[in-house]
Image: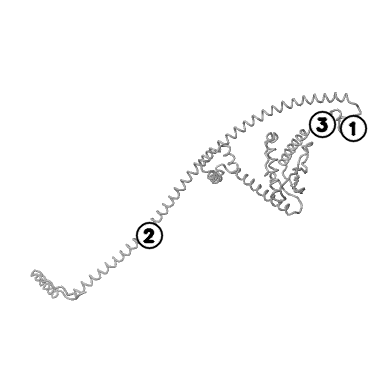
Amino acid sequence: MGRTYPKPRKSQTPAQKDALERARKQLRANKKNVAPATVVAKLSAKVQLLEERALDYQAELKETKRKYWNERKRARKYKEVCRTQKREMKMLSGEAYHLRGALDKAEKEVARIEKLANRGHEHLQEEIKTLEAEKRTVAQERTSLKKKCRRLLSALKMLREYTPDRLDLSLDTWYQREWWKEMINRQMSKRTVKRAVLEGGVAADIQLAYEMLNSDKLTFSSDSTSHEHIEYEVRTIAVRVLDYSDPDAEPQWCMRSMGVGTSIDHTSETQMNGLRKRLEDIAAIFNSSPLAKREALSFSPDDFAYRLIGTSGDHAADQQKSHRLLALWRMDVILQRMGEEALFAMDPMQLVEVLLPFKQAQVAKCGGKEAWELLPDEEKTKLDIELI
Protein backbone atom coordinates (compact mmCIF):
# COMPACT_ATOMS: atom_id res chain seq x y z
CA MET A 1 0.00 0.00 0.00
CA GLY A 2 1.21 3.54 -0.73
CA ARG A 3 1.68 6.25 1.82
CA THR A 4 -1.51 8.03 2.93
CA TYR A 5 -1.59 11.76 3.37
CA PRO A 6 -4.03 13.68 5.61
CA LYS A 7 -6.83 15.36 3.86
CA PRO A 8 -6.52 19.12 3.55
CA ARG A 9 -8.55 21.06 6.10
CA LYS A 10 -11.59 22.72 4.70
CA SER A 11 -11.71 26.46 4.96
CA GLN A 12 -14.37 27.90 7.27
CA THR A 13 -17.02 30.27 6.06
CA PRO A 14 -17.30 33.79 7.49
CA ALA A 15 -20.49 32.85 9.29
CA GLN A 16 -18.78 29.89 10.97
CA LYS A 17 -15.87 32.05 12.00
CA ASP A 18 -18.22 34.66 13.55
CA ALA A 19 -20.15 32.00 15.47
CA LEU A 20 -16.95 30.49 16.79
CA GLU A 21 -15.67 33.88 17.89
CA ARG A 22 -18.92 34.72 19.71
CA ALA A 23 -18.82 31.37 21.50
CA ARG A 24 -15.31 32.03 22.70
CA LYS A 25 -16.25 35.50 23.97
CA GLN A 26 -19.28 34.06 25.81
CA LEU A 27 -17.12 31.41 27.41
CA ARG A 28 -14.62 33.99 28.62
CA ALA A 29 -17.41 36.09 30.03
CA ASN A 30 -18.88 33.09 31.87
CA LYS A 31 -15.51 32.25 33.36
CA LYS A 32 -15.11 35.80 34.67
CA ASN A 33 -18.65 35.97 36.12
CA VAL A 34 -18.87 32.46 37.80
CA ALA A 35 -16.65 31.48 40.67
CA PRO A 36 -14.71 28.25 40.32
CA ALA A 37 -16.13 26.79 43.59
CA THR A 38 -19.68 27.28 42.40
CA VAL A 39 -18.87 25.60 39.11
CA VAL A 40 -17.27 22.67 40.90
CA ALA A 41 -20.24 22.31 43.26
CA LYS A 42 -22.70 22.35 40.40
CA LEU A 43 -20.58 19.86 38.48
CA SER A 44 -20.32 17.62 41.57
CA ALA A 45 -24.06 17.72 42.04
CA LYS A 46 -24.61 16.84 38.43
CA VAL A 47 -22.05 14.02 38.60
CA GLN A 48 -23.70 12.65 41.76
CA LEU A 49 -27.09 12.87 40.12
CA LEU A 50 -25.76 11.14 37.07
CA GLU A 51 -24.15 8.42 39.20
CA GLU A 52 -27.44 7.86 41.04
CA ARG A 53 -29.25 7.64 37.75
CA ALA A 54 -26.56 5.26 36.46
CA LEU A 55 -27.03 3.04 39.55
CA ASP A 56 -30.81 3.10 39.04
CA TYR A 57 -30.32 2.29 35.39
CA GLN A 58 -27.97 -0.56 36.30
CA ALA A 59 -30.50 -1.94 38.81
CA GLU A 60 -33.27 -1.65 36.24
CA LEU A 61 -30.99 -3.27 33.66
CA LYS A 62 -30.19 -6.13 36.04
CA GLU A 63 -33.87 -6.64 36.87
CA THR A 64 -34.74 -6.47 33.19
CA LYS A 65 -32.06 -9.03 32.37
CA ARG A 66 -33.30 -11.32 35.15
CA LYS A 67 -36.86 -11.08 33.85
CA TYR A 68 -35.61 -11.62 30.32
CA TRP A 69 -33.70 -14.81 31.20
CA ASN A 70 -36.57 -16.07 33.35
CA GLU A 71 -38.96 -15.50 30.50
CA ARG A 72 -36.53 -17.16 28.12
CA LYS A 73 -36.23 -20.22 30.38
CA ARG A 74 -40.00 -20.32 30.76
CA ALA A 75 -40.39 -20.08 26.99
CA ARG A 76 -37.90 -22.92 26.48
CA LYS A 77 -39.70 -25.10 29.01
CA TYR A 78 -43.01 -24.28 27.36
CA LYS A 79 -41.60 -25.22 23.97
CA GLU A 80 -40.22 -28.50 25.37
CA VAL A 81 -43.59 -29.27 26.98
CA CYS A 82 -45.33 -28.50 23.69
CA ARG A 83 -42.98 -30.80 21.80
CA THR A 84 -43.48 -33.56 24.40
CA GLN A 85 -47.25 -33.16 24.22
CA LYS A 86 -47.12 -33.27 20.44
CA ARG A 87 -45.12 -36.50 20.55
CA GLU A 88 -47.51 -37.99 23.11
CA MET A 89 -50.51 -36.92 21.06
CA LYS A 90 -48.95 -38.54 18.00
CA MET A 91 -48.29 -41.76 19.91
CA LEU A 92 -51.78 -41.73 21.41
CA SER A 93 -53.35 -41.17 18.01
CA GLY A 94 -51.36 -44.13 16.64
CA GLU A 95 -52.38 -46.31 19.55
CA ALA A 96 -55.98 -45.23 19.18
CA TYR A 97 -55.82 -46.16 15.49
CA HIS A 98 -54.43 -49.60 16.29
CA LEU A 99 -56.95 -50.08 19.10
CA ARG A 100 -59.81 -49.17 16.77
CA GLY A 101 -58.52 -51.75 14.30
CA ALA A 102 -58.12 -54.35 17.05
CA LEU A 103 -61.60 -53.55 18.35
CA ASP A 104 -63.08 -53.99 14.87
CA LYS A 105 -61.29 -57.30 14.49
CA ALA A 106 -62.42 -58.38 17.95
CA GLU A 107 -66.03 -57.48 17.11
CA LYS A 108 -65.81 -59.48 13.90
CA GLU A 109 -64.24 -62.39 15.78
CA VAL A 110 -66.93 -62.25 18.47
CA ALA A 111 -69.59 -62.20 15.77
CA ARG A 112 -67.99 -65.22 14.10
CA ILE A 113 -67.72 -67.05 17.44
CA GLU A 114 -71.38 -66.28 18.16
CA LYS A 115 -72.23 -67.63 14.72
CA LEU A 116 -70.26 -70.80 15.47
CA ALA A 117 -71.94 -71.07 18.87
CA ASN A 118 -75.38 -70.73 17.29
CA ARG A 119 -74.45 -73.29 14.69
CA GLY A 120 -73.17 -75.61 17.43
CA HIS A 121 -76.40 -75.07 19.39
CA GLU A 122 -78.44 -75.99 16.33
CA HIS A 123 -76.26 -79.03 15.77
CA LEU A 124 -76.73 -80.09 19.40
CA GLN A 125 -80.48 -79.71 19.05
CA GLU A 126 -80.39 -81.93 15.97
CA GLU A 127 -78.27 -84.43 17.87
CA ILE A 128 -80.78 -84.39 20.73
CA LYS A 129 -83.60 -85.07 18.30
CA THR A 130 -81.58 -87.89 16.75
CA LEU A 131 -80.83 -89.36 20.17
CA GLU A 132 -84.48 -89.17 21.14
CA ALA A 133 -85.38 -90.99 17.94
CA GLU A 134 -82.68 -93.60 18.67
CA LYS A 135 -84.00 -93.89 22.22
CA ARG A 136 -87.46 -94.66 20.89
CA THR A 137 -85.94 -97.17 18.48
CA VAL A 138 -83.99 -98.82 21.31
CA ALA A 139 -87.15 -98.98 23.40
CA GLN A 140 -88.97 -100.68 20.54
CA GLU A 141 -86.08 -103.08 20.04
CA ARG A 142 -86.05 -103.77 23.77
CA THR A 143 -89.73 -104.64 23.69
CA SER A 144 -89.13 -106.87 20.70
CA LEU A 145 -86.20 -108.57 22.42
CA LYS A 146 -88.28 -109.17 25.54
CA LYS A 147 -90.86 -110.91 23.40
CA LYS A 148 -88.17 -113.00 21.74
CA CYS A 149 -86.70 -113.90 25.13
CA ARG A 150 -90.08 -115.04 26.35
CA ARG A 151 -90.49 -117.20 23.23
CA LEU A 152 -86.97 -118.61 23.69
CA LEU A 153 -87.67 -119.40 27.35
CA SER A 154 -90.86 -121.13 26.32
CA ALA A 155 -88.99 -123.12 23.64
CA LEU A 156 -86.23 -123.99 26.18
CA LYS A 157 -88.85 -125.22 28.60
CA MET A 158 -90.37 -127.38 25.90
CA LEU A 159 -86.88 -128.66 24.97
CA ARG A 160 -86.19 -129.63 28.56
CA GLU A 161 -89.40 -131.61 28.63
CA TYR A 162 -88.20 -133.68 25.65
CA THR A 163 -84.58 -134.25 26.89
CA PRO A 164 -83.54 -137.10 29.23
CA ASP A 165 -83.47 -136.29 32.91
CA ARG A 166 -79.86 -137.45 33.27
CA LEU A 167 -78.56 -134.76 30.90
CA ASP A 168 -78.19 -131.10 31.77
CA LEU A 169 -78.27 -128.29 29.22
CA SER A 170 -74.95 -126.84 30.40
CA LEU A 171 -71.60 -127.70 28.76
CA ASP A 172 -69.73 -128.74 31.89
CA THR A 173 -68.91 -132.33 30.88
CA TRP A 174 -67.57 -133.99 27.77
CA TYR A 175 -70.72 -136.06 27.41
CA GLN A 176 -72.90 -132.97 27.43
CA ARG A 177 -70.74 -131.24 24.79
CA GLU A 178 -70.84 -134.30 22.57
CA TRP A 179 -74.62 -134.50 23.01
CA TRP A 180 -74.97 -130.87 21.92
CA LYS A 181 -72.72 -131.51 18.93
CA GLU A 182 -75.03 -134.29 17.84
CA MET A 183 -78.05 -132.08 18.46
CA ILE A 184 -76.65 -129.12 16.48
CA ASN A 185 -74.45 -130.98 13.98
CA ARG A 186 -72.98 -127.72 12.64
CA GLN A 187 -69.54 -126.08 12.60
CA MET A 188 -68.52 -122.44 12.32
CA SER A 189 -66.94 -121.50 9.02
CA LYS A 190 -63.58 -119.73 8.78
CA ARG A 191 -65.32 -116.54 7.71
CA THR A 192 -67.59 -116.69 10.77
CA VAL A 193 -64.58 -117.23 13.00
CA LYS A 194 -62.76 -114.23 11.45
CA ARG A 195 -65.83 -112.04 11.90
CA ALA A 196 -66.23 -113.18 15.52
CA VAL A 197 -62.57 -112.36 16.23
CA LEU A 198 -62.90 -108.97 14.52
CA GLU A 199 -66.07 -108.06 16.37
CA GLY A 200 -64.61 -109.30 19.64
CA GLY A 201 -61.51 -107.15 19.07
CA VAL A 202 -63.67 -104.11 18.41
CA ALA A 203 -65.68 -104.75 21.57
CA ALA A 204 -62.45 -105.19 23.53
CA ASP A 205 -61.10 -101.86 22.25
CA ILE A 206 -64.35 -100.11 23.19
CA GLN A 207 -64.25 -101.65 26.68
CA LEU A 208 -60.56 -100.70 27.09
CA ALA A 209 -61.17 -97.03 26.16
CA TYR A 210 -64.27 -96.87 28.39
CA GLU A 211 -62.37 -98.25 31.38
CA MET A 212 -59.44 -95.86 30.84
CA LEU A 213 -61.84 -92.90 30.74
CA ASN A 214 -63.58 -94.00 33.94
CA SER A 215 -60.30 -94.60 35.78
CA ASP A 216 -58.40 -91.69 37.33
CA LYS A 217 -55.00 -93.42 37.09
CA LEU A 218 -53.32 -96.27 35.23
CA THR A 219 -49.91 -97.86 34.72
CA PHE A 220 -48.26 -99.17 31.56
CA SER A 221 -45.85 -102.00 30.88
CA SER A 222 -44.45 -103.43 27.66
CA ASP A 223 -41.89 -105.87 26.37
CA SER A 224 -40.73 -107.08 23.00
CA THR A 225 -38.89 -109.95 21.38
CA SER A 226 -37.82 -110.94 17.89
CA HIS A 227 -38.58 -114.05 15.91
CA GLU A 228 -37.22 -114.65 12.42
CA HIS A 229 -36.12 -110.98 12.19
CA ILE A 230 -39.60 -109.70 13.13
CA GLU A 231 -40.11 -107.61 16.28
CA TYR A 232 -43.14 -108.54 18.38
CA GLU A 233 -44.36 -106.12 21.06
CA VAL A 234 -46.88 -106.79 23.81
CA ARG A 235 -48.46 -103.94 25.80
CA THR A 236 -50.36 -104.20 29.07
CA ILE A 237 -52.02 -101.63 31.32
CA ALA A 238 -53.35 -101.78 34.87
CA VAL A 239 -56.53 -99.75 35.52
CA ARG A 240 -59.05 -99.43 38.30
CA VAL A 241 -62.37 -100.86 37.03
CA LEU A 242 -65.75 -101.59 38.50
CA ASP A 243 -67.11 -105.06 39.03
CA TYR A 244 -69.77 -105.27 36.32
CA SER A 245 -71.75 -107.76 38.42
CA ASP A 246 -71.66 -105.37 41.42
CA PRO A 247 -71.43 -101.71 40.22
CA ASP A 248 -71.72 -100.37 43.79
CA ALA A 249 -68.49 -102.06 44.91
CA GLU A 250 -65.17 -100.24 45.17
CA PRO A 251 -63.13 -100.23 41.91
CA GLN A 252 -60.31 -102.75 41.84
CA TRP A 253 -57.00 -102.85 39.96
CA CYS A 254 -57.19 -105.12 36.93
CA MET A 255 -54.81 -105.99 34.12
CA ARG A 256 -55.87 -105.26 30.54
CA SER A 257 -54.00 -106.27 27.42
CA MET A 258 -53.58 -103.85 24.56
CA GLY A 259 -52.70 -106.63 22.16
CA VAL A 260 -49.58 -107.86 20.41
CA GLY A 261 -48.12 -105.96 17.47
CA THR A 262 -45.10 -105.91 15.22
CA SER A 263 -42.52 -103.22 14.49
CA ILE A 264 -39.61 -102.66 12.13
CA ASP A 265 -36.96 -102.21 14.85
CA HIS A 266 -36.40 -102.18 18.60
CA THR A 267 -35.75 -98.44 19.21
CA SER A 268 -37.56 -96.38 21.81
CA GLU A 269 -38.94 -93.95 19.21
CA THR A 270 -40.47 -96.83 17.24
CA GLN A 271 -42.05 -98.21 20.42
CA MET A 272 -43.53 -94.79 21.26
CA ASN A 273 -44.89 -94.38 17.74
CA GLY A 274 -46.40 -97.87 17.91
CA LEU A 275 -48.07 -97.05 21.26
CA ARG A 276 -49.48 -93.79 19.87
CA LYS A 277 -50.74 -95.59 16.75
CA ARG A 278 -52.43 -98.25 18.90
CA LEU A 279 -54.08 -95.58 21.08
CA GLU A 280 -55.25 -93.68 17.99
CA ASP A 281 -56.86 -96.88 16.64
CA ILE A 282 -58.61 -97.45 19.98
CA ALA A 283 -59.78 -93.80 20.01
CA ALA A 284 -61.14 -94.04 16.45
CA ILE A 285 -63.11 -97.20 17.27
CA PHE A 286 -64.46 -95.90 20.59
CA ASN A 287 -65.41 -92.40 19.35
CA SER A 288 -67.43 -93.87 16.49
CA SER A 289 -69.23 -96.38 18.73
CA PRO A 290 -72.85 -95.95 19.88
CA LEU A 291 -71.65 -96.12 23.50
CA ALA A 292 -69.53 -92.98 23.11
CA LYS A 293 -72.34 -91.11 21.38
CA ARG A 294 -74.92 -92.18 23.94
CA GLU A 295 -72.73 -91.32 26.94
CA ALA A 296 -71.28 -88.18 25.26
CA LEU A 297 -67.71 -89.46 25.76
CA SER A 298 -64.58 -88.95 23.71
CA PHE A 299 -61.20 -90.65 24.00
CA SER A 300 -57.82 -89.49 22.72
CA PRO A 301 -54.21 -90.67 23.24
CA ASP A 302 -53.68 -87.66 25.53
CA ASP A 303 -56.26 -89.13 27.96
CA PHE A 304 -53.97 -92.14 28.34
CA ALA A 305 -50.92 -89.92 29.04
CA TYR A 306 -52.89 -87.71 31.45
CA ARG A 307 -53.85 -90.70 33.66
CA LEU A 308 -50.47 -92.42 33.44
CA ILE A 309 -48.79 -92.61 36.87
CA GLY A 310 -46.10 -95.24 36.24
CA THR A 311 -44.43 -97.61 33.82
CA SER A 312 -42.60 -100.91 34.18
CA GLY A 313 -40.17 -102.85 32.04
CA ASP A 314 -36.76 -104.49 32.07
CA HIS A 315 -33.42 -102.74 32.55
CA ALA A 316 -32.65 -102.40 28.84
CA ALA A 317 -31.58 -98.99 27.56
CA ASP A 318 -34.52 -98.75 25.17
CA GLN A 319 -37.00 -99.34 28.00
CA GLN A 320 -35.40 -96.63 30.14
CA LYS A 321 -35.52 -94.17 27.24
CA SER A 322 -39.15 -95.11 26.53
CA HIS A 323 -39.91 -94.36 30.19
CA ARG A 324 -38.37 -90.87 29.82
CA LEU A 325 -40.28 -90.23 26.58
CA LEU A 326 -43.55 -91.23 28.27
CA ALA A 327 -42.78 -88.88 31.17
CA LEU A 328 -42.17 -85.97 28.77
CA TRP A 329 -45.40 -86.75 26.90
CA ARG A 330 -47.35 -86.87 30.18
CA MET A 331 -45.89 -83.53 31.33
CA ASP A 332 -46.79 -81.88 27.99
CA VAL A 333 -50.38 -83.14 28.26
CA ILE A 334 -50.71 -81.95 31.87
CA LEU A 335 -49.41 -78.46 30.99
CA GLN A 336 -51.71 -78.29 27.96
CA ARG A 337 -54.78 -79.20 30.02
CA MET A 338 -53.86 -76.73 32.74
CA GLY A 339 -53.59 -74.05 30.03
CA GLU A 340 -57.00 -75.05 28.63
CA GLU A 341 -58.55 -74.81 32.10
CA ALA A 342 -57.00 -71.35 32.57
CA LEU A 343 -58.35 -70.18 29.21
CA PHE A 344 -61.86 -71.50 29.89
CA ALA A 345 -61.86 -69.71 33.26
CA MET A 346 -61.12 -66.30 31.67
CA ASP A 347 -63.61 -63.58 30.88
CA PRO A 348 -64.72 -63.69 27.19
CA MET A 349 -63.20 -60.29 26.39
CA GLN A 350 -59.94 -61.19 28.15
CA LEU A 351 -59.89 -64.50 26.29
CA VAL A 352 -60.32 -62.69 22.98
CA GLU A 353 -57.50 -60.30 23.93
CA VAL A 354 -55.19 -63.24 24.71
CA LEU A 355 -56.04 -65.27 21.60
CA LEU A 356 -56.14 -62.32 19.18
CA PRO A 357 -52.34 -62.22 18.44
CA PHE A 358 -52.30 -65.98 17.81
CA LYS A 359 -55.39 -65.65 15.62
CA GLN A 360 -53.73 -62.92 13.57
CA ALA A 361 -50.63 -65.08 13.14
CA GLN A 362 -52.84 -68.01 12.08
CA VAL A 363 -54.67 -65.86 9.50
CA ALA A 364 -51.33 -64.57 8.18
CA LYS A 365 -50.04 -68.15 7.94
CA CYS A 366 -53.09 -69.09 5.86
CA GLY A 367 -52.29 -66.33 3.35
CA GLY A 368 -54.11 -63.31 4.73
CA LYS A 369 -57.67 -62.34 5.46
CA GLU A 370 -58.93 -62.95 1.91
CA ALA A 371 -57.48 -66.47 1.84
CA TRP A 372 -58.97 -67.11 5.31
CA GLU A 373 -62.43 -66.08 4.16
CA LEU A 374 -62.18 -68.52 1.23
CA LEU A 375 -61.60 -71.51 3.55
CA PRO A 376 -64.63 -73.76 4.23
CA ASP A 377 -66.32 -73.52 7.62
CA GLU A 378 -65.20 -77.02 8.62
CA GLU A 379 -61.56 -76.10 8.03
CA LYS A 380 -61.96 -72.83 9.99
CA THR A 381 -63.52 -74.70 12.91
CA LYS A 382 -60.69 -77.25 12.89
CA LEU A 383 -58.05 -74.49 12.90
CA ASP A 384 -59.86 -72.65 15.73
CA ILE A 385 -59.87 -75.83 17.82
CA GLU A 386 -56.15 -76.31 17.19
CA LEU A 387 -55.53 -72.68 18.19
CA ILE A 388 -57.36 -73.07 21.51
Towards the viewer: 338 or 39: 338
> Identity of the amino acid at label 1?
Tyr
- Can residue 388 be seen here? The reply is no
**In the drawing, does residue 180 fall left or right of residue 253?**
right
Determine whether the residue tagged by mark 3 lies in a helix, strand or loop: loop
Q: Residue at x 76, y 39 (%)?
A: 242
Tell me whether the residue at label 3 lies in contact with that at label 2, contact meaning CB atoms closer than 8 angstroms. Answer: no
Sequence-first disc among 1 and 3: 1
Q: Which label lies toward us, 3 or 2?
A: 3
| 287 left or right of 69 in image | right
Give, as a three-letter code, the residue at label 3. Answer: Gln
Q: Nearer the viewer, residue 53 or 192?
A: 192
Label 1 sits on residue: 175
The residue most toward the front is: 228
Check disc 3 and report the residue beneath it: 187
**Relative to 130, residue 336 above or below:** below
Tell me which colouring the rendered structure shows: one colour
- Relative to residue 58, is residue 243 drawn left or right? right
- Of the image marks 3 and 2, the number of the one nearer the N terminus: 2
Q: Which label sits on residue 73?
A: 2
